Image: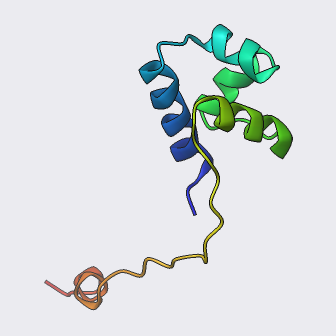
């Protein structure tokens, strides 16, 4: 699943592509400009409803997927403990 910072970057990019500034997006999503800034910077901890409105305005959607684990390769682990 994507983290808040990655979500914020995608929202900011979509907003810019639409030619909107943060205030215009906030007005369309019925929220405050500071909320848009928090979302785009990965600091928003508010309601999912606000997120949904913002994401909808910029033409994106949330997808819930099984969590993926990114384990390091054996060679990378082995290199950490190499005595050389």
**Quadrant location of residue 43?**
top right
Residue 49 appears in the rendering: yes
Q: Position of residue 49 (x, y in %)?
A: 84, 41
Q: State the residue in front, 3 or 81.
A: 3
Instruction: Report the residue at 21% width, 87% height from top.
Output: 82
Q: State the residue in front, 28 or 48.
A: 28
Q: Position of residue 14 (x, y in %)?
A: 48, 30
Q: State the residue in front, 62 or 42.
A: 62
Task: Using residue 9 as the reference point, say whether residue 74 is left or right of it.
Answer: left
Instruction: Report the residue at 73% width, 36% height from top.
Output: 44
Residue 33 appears in the rendering: no
Q: Position of residue 63 (x, y in %)?
A: 62, 60
Quarter of the image with the C terminus in it? bottom left
Task: Using residue 40 as the reference point, say whether residue 77 is left or right of it.
Answer: left
Which residue lies most toward the left here?
84
Q: Position of residue 51 (x, y in %)?
A: 74, 39
Quarter of the image with the N terminus in it? bottom right
Q: Is residue 35 above or below residue 65?
A: above
Instruction: Report the residue at 57% width, 42% height from top.
Output: 60
Instruction: Report the residue at 46% width, 19% height from top.
Output: 16
């Amino acid at each position: 699943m994507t983290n808040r910072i990655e979500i914020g970057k995608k929202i900011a990019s979509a907003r810019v592509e639409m030619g909107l500034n943060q205030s215009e997006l906030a007005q369309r999503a019925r929220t405050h400009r500071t909320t848009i800034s928090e979302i785009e910077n990965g600091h928003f901890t508010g309601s999912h409803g606000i997120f949904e409105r913002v994401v909808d305005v910029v033409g994106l959607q949330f997808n819930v997927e099984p969590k993926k684990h990114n384990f390091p390769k054996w060679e990378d682990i082995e290199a950490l403990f190499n005595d050389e």
